[in-house]
Amino acid sequence: MYFIFFLIWIIFNGQFTLEIAAFGVVIAGFIYWFICKFLNYSPRTDIILIKKMFQILHYLFVLILEIVKANFTVVKLIMSSKYELEPVVIKFRTDLKTRPARILLANSITLTPGTITVSLSNDEYMVHCLDKSLAQGIDKSIFVELLEKMEMGVCMEDKDNDADK
């Protein structure tokens, strides 16, 4: 996170000089200290994110791919005159354990054309689908699988850290 703050400082300044870099090092350090002290962030979080970087990038790639596929599906549904759309609101539960994973799933569903997450309450989702065909298998989608895999590593690391204490 420290390096991200430093890069943002350099980008916002629009140029790179020794003075800007020196101030950036100090300011990025202060901001990093602040989020660690007051916003419940830790260097351990950075380590977890670095370990999960390939999984996160894979998730983003799959999300973009699913958005593109859903765009074509929605265009096909709308342009087809022989098919009558049947909007549906579905409820389903998920086995995701962490709140960030649940929120990421809700946002991924909403970003995918043809579906909108109406509500998220604990582990229960209410999703509006443009057509009932878009609702099939939403509770066991690729997003859920990838998030469960990412969660599995985080939960294991938390158990290891609890055992060390």
Image: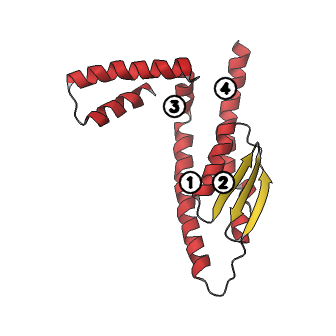
Residue at image coords 71%, 12%: 165
From the viewer's perspective, is 7 left or right of 98? left
Determine crowd level at label 3: few under 14, some 14-19, many 20+ residues with C-alpha closer than 10 A: few
Q: Which residue is mark 1?
A: 62
Residue 70 in the image: state x and y as whole percent: 58, 66
Give left or right: position of 25 versus 131: left
CB under 8 Å between discs 2 and 1: yes
Q: Which mark is residue 40?
A: none
Q: Which mark is residue 50?
A: 3
- Where is mark 2, residue-wise? 142
Q: Position of residue 126 (x, y in %)?
A: 74, 55
Question: Which residue bears the numbered disc 4?
Answer: 157
Task: Give SS at disc 1.
Answer: helix
Where disc 4 sits, the SS reads: helix
Mark-to-mark CA distance, 3 and 1: 19 Å
Mark 2 vs mark 3: which is more N-terminal?
Answer: 3
At label 3, which amino acid type do we have? Ile
Residue shown at 57% from the left, 56% from the top: 111
Q: Secondary structure at mark 3?
A: helix
Which comes before the other along the chain, label 4 or label 3?
Answer: 3
Counting residues from the N terminus, which is met first, the one under dot 3 or under dot 1?
A: 3
